[in-house]
């Protein structure tokens, strides 16, 4: 700051730009993104005054990134679009890739997945053309994240394994840690808890070694979710609480919404339902504040789930249907499938069988599209049970037969035998 003061008195523009860049970078390392953005804004103004387009490009990139870190995604998009325009004018292809990455990341955070995919695929193509391995790694990791949100887990794993391979080739320890944590996130969606724990223990070790708080937060969060999946609720709460504390330290809001939802699930499992709703309401408010539509839908869905658990079905349906509308808008099919099933279950319980059929059928169609075999079986079984209640026996037998076939394939003999017995009682054959 002393050097900056002197350079201003001497009207040394280059020295001013250098000092402000160093100050901004220091604030970023302290996770003080608002203060960093102010210096980058000053750099932008001065560089425009003296016609230094290279400094303008750097300023635009960093302002966009600060807004992204502050979860102000629309503002971030504005600066990355300006960056892309000026980088195309100057022919700076490296910063063109940076602008494309920034736009894709912001659209992903806003739940506009198709737009995000278009930008990331463009980033990947240019990176490969220019042999920019770091940006190629980044594009693969970003595509993995979007595929994960869309329920395309095999594609997500393929992309993330490529990113991990490139990180290893480049001896990029942070990139390796990020990819390991992302692989843990994908296996989390697949409910493969041992794989989550294996990958995230590795990413946690790297995060501690390089003191990367963002990676620490994600690793603790994923580990907490995995232990919750294994019914180790107290361990899960401890790990998720550590992740939550770090999110407050670094001002990270988008991941915080998922951490709060994980804490809500753990509290629901140990019957702390009021606390579960509090966590979800906080997650919902943050998601709406930052424009995270997937997070908003997830929070609404969990609030609905808690009300369903409390048998307050009218409120559960309100929250579930709000969540479903958002998920349909953003194309998150895996989450849609579960909501269709949950809504169908409420209508079935309330003996509103025709409404239940519509939702169970939608759940079945999506499960088939996503090739989620266990969910196909569950949806077919639920649909068969609903037809059974309406005495539509041929349709019931047809659905029971599909469920029987899948349970046999999965090796679930208990369910398969139950289906067989039910079909025999109705006069049907497997």
Image: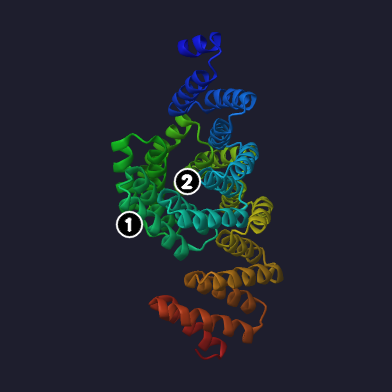
**Circle 1 sits in a helix, a strand or a loop, which is it?**
helix
Is 245 displayed left or right of 87 in the figure? left
User: Label 1 crowding class (10 Å Cα cut-off): few <14, some 14-19, many 20+?
Assistant: some
Q: Residue at x 40, y 48 (%)?
A: 222
Between residue 146 and residue 256, name the one nearer to us. 146
Relative image position of residue 283 (x, y in whole percent): 56, 40
Q: Quadrant of residue 359?
A: bottom right
Q: Quickly name the residue at label 2.
A: 262
Between residue 193 and residue 198, name the one nearer to us. 198
Mark 2 vs 1: CB contact within 8 A: no
Q: Earlier in the sequence, mark 2 or mark 1?
A: 1
**Circle 2 sits in a helix, a strand or a loop, which is it?**
helix
Relative image position of residue 126 (x, y in whole percent): 51, 55
Between residue 358 and residue 245, name the one nearer to us. 245
Q: Residue 133 carries which label?
A: none
| Measured Cα–Cα span from mark 2 to mark 1 | 18 Å
Q: Residue 194 carries which label?
A: 1
User: Label 2 crowding class (10 Å Cα cut-off): few <14, some 14-19, many 20+?
Assistant: many
Looking at the image, residue 419 lies above or below residue 309: below
Question: Which circle, 2 or 1, is nearer the viewer?
Answer: 1
Looking at the image, residue 336 lies above or below residue 241: below
Image mark count: 2
Looking at the image, residue 150 lies above or below residue 89: below
Relative image position of residue 372 (x, y in whole percent): 50, 70
Is 317 displayed left or right of 21 in the figure? right
Is 111 displayed left or right of 197 in the figure? right
């Amino acid at each position: 700051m002393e050097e900056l003061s002197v350079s201003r008195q001497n009207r040394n523009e280059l020295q001013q730009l250098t000092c402000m860049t160093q100050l901004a970078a220091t604030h970023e390392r302290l996770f003080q993104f608002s203060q960093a953005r102010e210096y980058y804004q000053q750099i932008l103004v001065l560089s425009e005054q003296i016609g230094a387009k290279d400094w303008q490009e750097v300023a635009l990139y960093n302002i966009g990134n600060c807004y992204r870190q502050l979860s102000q995604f629309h503002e971030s998009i504005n600066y990355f679009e300006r960056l892309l325009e000026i980088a195309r004018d100057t022919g700076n292809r490296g910063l063109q890739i940076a602008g494309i990455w920034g736009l894709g990341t912001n659209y992903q955070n806003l739940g506009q997945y198709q737009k995000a995919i278009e930008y990331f695929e463009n980033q990947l193509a240019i990176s490969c053309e220019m042999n920019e391995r770091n940006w190629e790694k980044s594009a693969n990791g970003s595509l993995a994240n979007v595929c994960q949100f869309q329920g395309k887990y095999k594609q997500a794993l393929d992309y993330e394994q490529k990113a991990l391979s490139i990180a290893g080739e480049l001896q990029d320890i942070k990139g390796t840690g990020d990819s390991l944590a992302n692989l843990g996130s994908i296996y989390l969606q697949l409910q493969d808890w041992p794989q989550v724990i294996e990958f995230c223990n590795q990413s946690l070790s790297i995060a501690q070694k390089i003191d990367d708080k963002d990676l620490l937060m994600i690793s603790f969060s994923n580990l907490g979710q995995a232990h919750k999946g294994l019914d180790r609720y107290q361990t899960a709460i401890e790990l998720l609480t550590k992740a939550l504390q770090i999110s407050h330290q670094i001002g990270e809001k988008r991941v915080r919404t998922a951490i709060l939802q994980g804490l809500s699930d753990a509290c629901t499992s140990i019957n702390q339902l009021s606390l579960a709703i509090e966590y979800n309401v906080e997650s919902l408010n943050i998601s709406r504040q930052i424009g995270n539509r997937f997070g908003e839908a997830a929070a609404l869905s969990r609030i609905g789930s808690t009300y369903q658990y409390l048998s307050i079905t009218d409120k559960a349906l309100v929250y579930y249907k709000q969540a479903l509308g958002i998920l349909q808008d953003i194309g998150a099919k895996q989450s849609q499938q579960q909501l269709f099933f949950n809504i169908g279950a409420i209508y079935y319980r309330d003996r509103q069988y025709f409404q239940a059929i519509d939702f169970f059928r939608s759940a079945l169609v999506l499960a088939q599209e996503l090739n989620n075999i266990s969910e196909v079986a569950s949806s077919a079984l639920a649909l068969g049970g609903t037809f059974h209640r309406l005495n539509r026996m041929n349709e019931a037998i047809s659905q029971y037969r599909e469920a029987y076939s899948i349970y046999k394939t999965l090796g679930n003999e208990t369910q398969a035998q139950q289906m067989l017995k039910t079909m025999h009682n109705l006069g049907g054959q497997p």
